[in-house]
Image (spheres, rainbow, N blue to C red):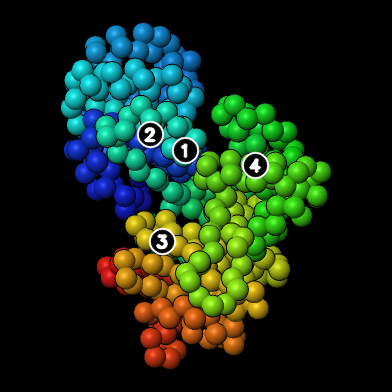
Amino acid sequence: MHDLLSRSIESFVKENLSIFPAVAILGPRQCGKSTLVKMLYQNSDAYLYLDLQNLEDLNKLKEPLLFFRANQDVTICLDEIQLAPQLFSVLRSEIDRYRHPGRFILLGSASQDLIQKTSESLAGRIGLIELTPFTITEAEQSTPFDLHKFWLRGGYPDSYLASSDRGSMLWRENFLRTYVERDIPQLGFQIPALQLRRLLTMCAHSQGQLLNSSRLGESLGVTYQTVRRYIDLMEQTFVIRSLPPFEKNVKKRLVKSPKIYVRDSGLLHRLLQIDDFNSLMGHPVFGASWEGFVIENIMSSLRDCKFTFYRSATGDELDLLIENGTTTIAVDCKASMAPQVTKGFWNALEITKPDKTYIIAPVPAPYSYKKDIEVCGLSDFLITNAISL
């Protein structure tokens, strides 16, 4: 069913495959990496797929050089590459022996920093691409598109396309359990599953708030350094996002801590046991959930920008600042069809002086709020700014 929705990154993947001998597509487990690659090669015989979680496939690589040379004229896709880091040095010597674009596709559920070998061994030989779960522009291909359903269920293909809310909820629960019980230990981290799940849940309760490692550590009975390490790991495995503060040389005292978000709104809602839209509307996380949903979609769609948030010590705030070259765009997120802003919003605009400001809300059509300030929906924002940035 996923192949009904095409991925906007497809042409970028093809471009990389035409340039680099190896292309790594990194992103969370189950976000559609192998589906995307299978779609790219669906009518091709020159393609071999190996899943490194599958013992039979792993056995084929007992003599990796032999295997790669026997199949040097086909594209070899290695899925879950983080489970076999020893292959990177072999890949390097094989690429240097026969350098041909698109020989290897590496799929991984951990970032390049976590799979350090990628950047070290394959520098100059590899194109690195991050694939996220569905963004709103991809999800809108499903008909009829329902914003509330997409926001509630999140962008993981199996969650979003499930035949019922309950089916989606069960999928997300299973994803979270597998993540803490199997995925993290497979990467070599011995963290008690229960402790990691508790920390994830605490992050969900702190959605869009400043990271307070000491407070989280006290609640968990661990040091703040341990909390920072766990959160870093959850970032490197694409489950948590930390947004850094704006640090330009302004006279105001600014906060120094990042804000943290559970990246996928569906996982956020499952961690908080919010399983239908009415429950979400009545929950204290409602506004922060919309903020995280908007920010994640923007950051996943507009890739080559710098993203920060602005908050002064007195509480003046902008949810997101997007910088691209000399252009700065400010975004404020409001989960209301009749959004209102506070004095702190105007103060923040005065200090940051963006070129254009958007208030992103679940509104049916965009309208002008004041000069250079527009209220619009998330899709309208992305369509406008994908072109201008």
Q: Is residue 160 visible?
A: yes
Task: Give the image quarter of residue 365.
Answer: bottom left
Residue 11 x, y percent position in the rendering: 24, 48
In the rendered image, which residue does mark 4 sit on? 230
Kindly check if marks 4 and 1 are in contact, taking CB atoms under 8 A apart as contact. Answer: no
Q: Secondary structure at mark 1?
A: loop
> Could you tell whether 142 is left or right of 251 in the image?
left
Q: Secondary structure at mark 2?
A: helix
The residue sitting at 70% across, 41% down in the picture is 226
Q: Amino acid at mark 2?
A: Ser
> Disc 2 or 1, which lies upstream in sequence?
1
Per the model, the C-alpha gap separating discs 2 and 4 is 22 Å
**Badge 4, how many Cα within 10 Å: few under 14, some, many 20+?**
some
Q: Secondary structure at mark 3?
A: strand
Task: Give the image quarter of residue 193.
Answer: top right
Number of marks drawn: 4
Q: Which mark is residue 119?
A: 2
Kindly check if marks 3 and 2 are in contact, taking CB atoms under 8 A apart as contact. Answer: no
Residue 220 x, y percent position in the rendering: 79, 45
In the rendered image, which residue does mark 3 sit on? 306
Residue 217 vs 320, above or below: the answer is above
Q: Amino acid at mark 4?
A: Tyr
Q: Which mark is residue 113?
A: 1
Kindly check if marks 3 and 1 are in contact, taking CB atoms under 8 A apart as contact. Answer: no
Residue 232 x, y percent position in the rendering: 58, 44
Per the model, the C-alpha gap separating discs 3 and 1 is 19 Å
Quadrant occupied by the C terminus: bottom left
Extreme residue toward the bottom, this view: 370
Q: Secondary structure at mark 4?
A: helix
